[in-house]
Image (spheres, rainbow, N blue to C red):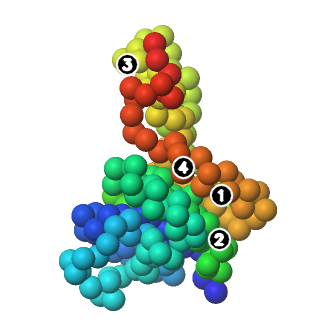
Amino acid sequence: MNESAVCTIITKSYLPYARTLASSLAKYNPDVNLYVLLADNIDDYFDPSLEPFKFIYLEDLSDPKIIEQMCFYYTPFELCCGLRGLLHEYMLEKTDVQKWLFLDSDIMVCNSLTVIFNQLENSSILLTPHVSTPADNNYADPDCEITYLKSGLYNAGFLGLRRTDTSKKFISWFKDRLRSFSFHDYASKDYISR
């Protein structure tokens, strides 16, 4: 049983990023496996058996009807964002990994992730805020707070989870929200306007 893992989501056009993530992860964290959800089809562009990570395919996920709908109405970028809840559900239900991190595929690991996995010993969920102190009145970007309200207070490129009842509830909620609310459209009525 692997205690810890990292997971990410890509379209095949992002395969070079996933390879870089895998290489850098292996360099500093050789005992941590990488799971990569492919959000489109291989279409004979590459041989998955030659890649340095474990592929997860759309058909491996639960709720194929939901995935079919999401593939219809989301752009590839939005789909990769929207599939995160289903990826975490996969990690929870189809692996025996106890703690895992979601990292955006364009992240390069530059050190051991042990300190982060250790933080999950006492937490079910780890999030990274975009800012940790309030912006002062002299802040260079007066629209900073509006930007965070539009795009979210937390950086979606990182999420840490430990197998607990709390994280199971979070994954269910997250999956449900991302099914319908992963549109990248600041002009929609769902975003706060001035």
Inspect the image, locate mark 3, and give the three-letter code of the amino acid beneath it.
Asp
Mark 4 or mark 3: name the one nearer the start of the chain: 3
Mark 2 or mark 1: name the one nearer the start of the chain: 2
- Give me the C-alpha separation between circle 2 and circle 4: 17 Å
On the image, numbered disc 1 is attached to which residue? 171
Of circles 2 and 3, which is in front? 2
The one nearer the camera, 130 or 10, is: 10
Circle 1 packing at 10 Å, graded few (<14), some (14-19), many (20+), is many
Mark 2 or mark 3: name the one nearer the start of the chain: 2
Q: Secondary structure at mark 2?
A: helix
Q: Secondary structure at mark 4?
A: helix
Inspect the image, locate mark 2, and give the three-letter code of the amino acid beneath it.
Leu
On the image, numbered disc 3 is attached to which residue? 141
- Give me the C-alpha separation between circle 2 and circle 3: 40 Å
- In the rendered image, residue 54, in percent from the top left (x then y), is placed at 44, 81
On the image, numbered disc 2 is attached to which residue? 92
Q: Secondary structure at mark 3?
A: loop
- In the rendered image, residue 30, in percent from the top left (x then y), is placed at 46, 80
Circle 4 packing at 10 Å, graded few (<14), some (14-19), many (20+), is some
Instruction: Please report contact status of discs 2 and 4: CB closer than 8 Å, yes or no.
Output: no
On the image, numbered disc 4 is attached to which residue? 178
What residue appears at the point 42 percent right and 78 percent down from the top-left corner?
Answer: 55
What residue appears at the point 64 percent right and 86 percent down from the top-left corner?
Answer: 1
Mark 1 or mark 4: name the one nearer the start of the chain: 1
Mark 1 or mark 3: name the one nearer the start of the chain: 3
Q: Does residue 121 show up? A: no
Circle 2 packing at 10 Å, graded few (<14), some (14-19), many (20+), is many
